[in-house]
């Protein structure tokens, strides 16, 4: 018997390599990082769902960029590449558990970006569908409900420290794909911290 019936993922960091896009559209690594941080902060504090494009544009302005750069970023997201091992790892995971993503974006963008992973996903839950952004519990719970899986039987693969808190608050075990080697801060450590997706196969068994 496998340890988990479902494995859910953050999309834009845990599965897709989005860092270079933020840097390229922003012009520098520092501005790109600030833009990304502001976008996360606005989403986390948004309350009821606001259109994702509005949040990206407002975050651009806060980072010192023209709000119109948001359109360039959103177009780029549609062409993001997965981490090199992601398609094979997810394909093998799908033989043992149901798999899906929970992502902070619109329905249209979520479907397009999730297709870039290259593996069939049993569910793609967006903030738009849930009516709120992560870190609220509703997006995580919607994914679990769609898969008919109890939180204790699901593992969430976070892409950022904030997602650790959000997914754990929904009752799931959490591991962190910390490819960017970000600091944990004062948060409680996850079940595991991974530099690639390969170890997930052992965690799920």
Image: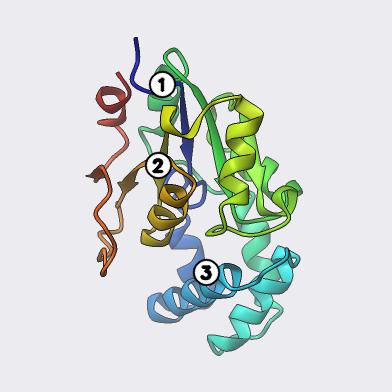
| Residue located 55% across and 90% down the image | 64
Please identify the quarter of the rendering in which residue 124 is found: top right
Real-space CA distance between mark 2 and mark 3, rounded to the nearest whole angstrom: 17 Å
Secondary structure beneath dot 1 equals helix
Secondary structure beneath dot 2 equals strand
Residue 72, relative to residue 114: is it above or below? below
Mark 1 surroundings: few (<14), some (14-19) or many (≥20) residues within 10 A: some
Residue 61, relative to residue 14: is it above or below? below
Kindly identify which residue carries mark 1: 93
Mark 3 surroundings: few (<14), some (14-19) or many (≥20) residues within 10 A: many
How many numbered discs? 3
**From the viewer's perspective, is 72 left or right of 38?**
right
| Residue located 47% across and 55% down the image | 166
User: What is the x, y in percent for residue 167?
Assistant: 45, 48
| Residue located 47% across and 74% down the image | 37
Real-space CA distance between mark 1 and mark 2, rounded to the nearest whole angstrom: 13 Å
Secondary structure beneath dot 3 equals helix
Q: Earlier in the sequence, mark 1 or mark 3?
A: 3
Kindly identify which residue carries mark 3: 40
Real-space CA distance between mark 1 and mark 3, rounded to the nearest whole angstrom: 28 Å
User: What is the x, y in percent for residue 184?
Assistant: 26, 63
Q: Earlier in the sequence, mark 2 or mark 3?
A: 3
Of residues 198 and 70, which is closer to you in this image? Answer: 198
């Amino acid at each position: 018997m496998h340890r988990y019936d479902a494995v859910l993922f953050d999309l834009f960091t845990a599965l897709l390599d989005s860092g270079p896009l933020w840097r390229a559209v922003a012009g520098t690594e520092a501005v790109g990082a600030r833009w990304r941080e502001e976008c996360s902060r606005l989403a986390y504090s948004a309350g009821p769902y606001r259109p994702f494009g509005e949040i990206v544009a407002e975050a651009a302005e806060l980072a010192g960029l023209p709000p119109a750069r948001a359109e360039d970023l959103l177009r780029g997201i549609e062409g993001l590449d997965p981490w090199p091992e992601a398609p094979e790892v997810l394909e093998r995971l799908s033989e043992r558990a149901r798999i899906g993503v929970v992502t902070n974006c619109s329905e249209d963008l979520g479907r397009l970006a999730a297709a870039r992973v290259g593996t069939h996903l049993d569910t793609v839950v967006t903030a738009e569908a849930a009516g709120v952004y992560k870190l609220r519990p509703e997006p995580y719970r919607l994914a679990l409900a769609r898969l008919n899986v109890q939180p204790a039987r699901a593992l969430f693969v976070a892409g950022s420290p904030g997602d650790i808190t959000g997914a754990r608050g929904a009752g799931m075990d959490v591991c962190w794909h910390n490819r960017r080697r970000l600091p944990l801060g004062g948060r409680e450590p996850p079940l595991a911290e991974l530099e690639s997706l390969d170890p997930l196969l052992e965690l799920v068994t």
